[in-house]
Amino acid sequence: MILIAYSSKDVAGTNIAKQVLHHFPFAKTDKVFQDTPVYFAQVKGKNINLVTLKDETVYAQDLPAHFSNAELVVFLSRHSSQSGKPTLSVHVPGNFGNAELGGFPRQVSVAPAKAMRDALKTLAQLRIELNLEYEVSYECTHHGPSLNVPTMFVELGSSPLQWSDFRAAEAVGRAAINAIADFGFSEEKAVLGIGGTHYNQRFTKMALKNEAIFGHMIPKYAVAEFDAEILRHCMERTLETVTSAIIDWKGVKGDDKYRLLKVLGDVGLPFEKV
């Protein structure tokens, strides 16, 4: 079973969920979760439940305990930034350092690399198809929850103006469902992305060109907390097999470069500088 979740406190998440219910064959069931009906649909043989959360999605740490057979969790969510730049994005939740916004310290969720790439590519296609003036991007791994099942956020941002954009909400909802419909075992090999900004356009372009599928992405600001333990953790917490790392070399601080290469060498993970 695949689980889609959004928060009733989240305008964007609510609007995305409305688009999912409108465009796909979901039906209300007699089940209730947190006082709200659970919706169900079957898409390409995938059983999908859609649930509403009372609290913000970043604090949904106990969600899998209520749906123990969930193979994948997809959160529909707003994205916020000070710039307010219109953005359609995909990322894994988790924390490389302290748990400042949900989840656990130094624990990340399991990254569904192929599903994220599939969602990213659909967002890029629908941006053109629906004539959306939005940037499509991977985001680096950040915030909670830290779940033991494959988990991704598909987001609409970055300000209240975009959160109420129903065409953009449709793009996010369709991207989520398309990724879910093709979810399953994949022999594709994943890579870790290291360095660069929170919205790494270099990694995004590589994925859109089918040059790599990224699991966890560690931005420049988090490299200082990067060590062998976190590296192994990110590799283990990726659904697909991680065979290498791709380093945005100019996007790593000079003081961090030697230590980063030493950590990769100690773990024995091959890498490529781009």
Image (tube, grey):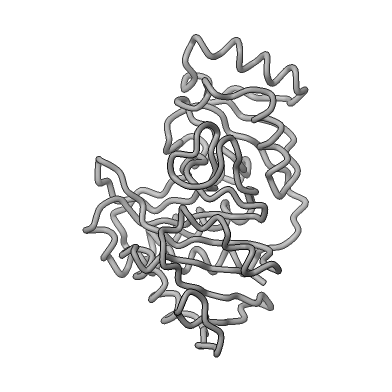
248 w.r.t. 103: above or below? above
Q: Quadrant of the C terminus?
A: top right
Name the residue nearer the viewer: 221 or 126: 221
Name the residue nearer the viewer: 94 or 90: 94
Q: In the rendering, at what x and y percent does residue 19 appear? A: 39, 75
Residue that appears at 55% across and 90% down: 30
191 w.r.t. 127: above or below? above
Tell me where residue 21 sits by quadrant: bottom left
Name the residue nearer the viewer: 113 or 238: 238
Q: Which residue reaches farthest bottom?
A: 30
94 w.r.t. 169: above or below? above
Q: Is residue 56 left or right of residue 152?
A: left
Q: Is residue 232 left or right of residue 156?
A: right
Name the residue nearer the viewer: 273 or 8: 8
Tell me where residue 7 sits by quadrant: bottom left
Residue that appears at 74% across and 26% down: 269
Q: In the rendering, at what x and y percent does residue 173 appear? A: 45, 68
Q: Is residue 228 left or right of residue 139?
A: right
Residue that appears at 61% across and 47% down: 109
Q: In the rendering, at what x and y percent does residue 253 appear? A: 47, 15
Q: Quadrant of the N terminus?
A: bottom right
Image mark count: 0
Q: In the rendering, at what x and y percent does residue 263 appear? A: 68, 18
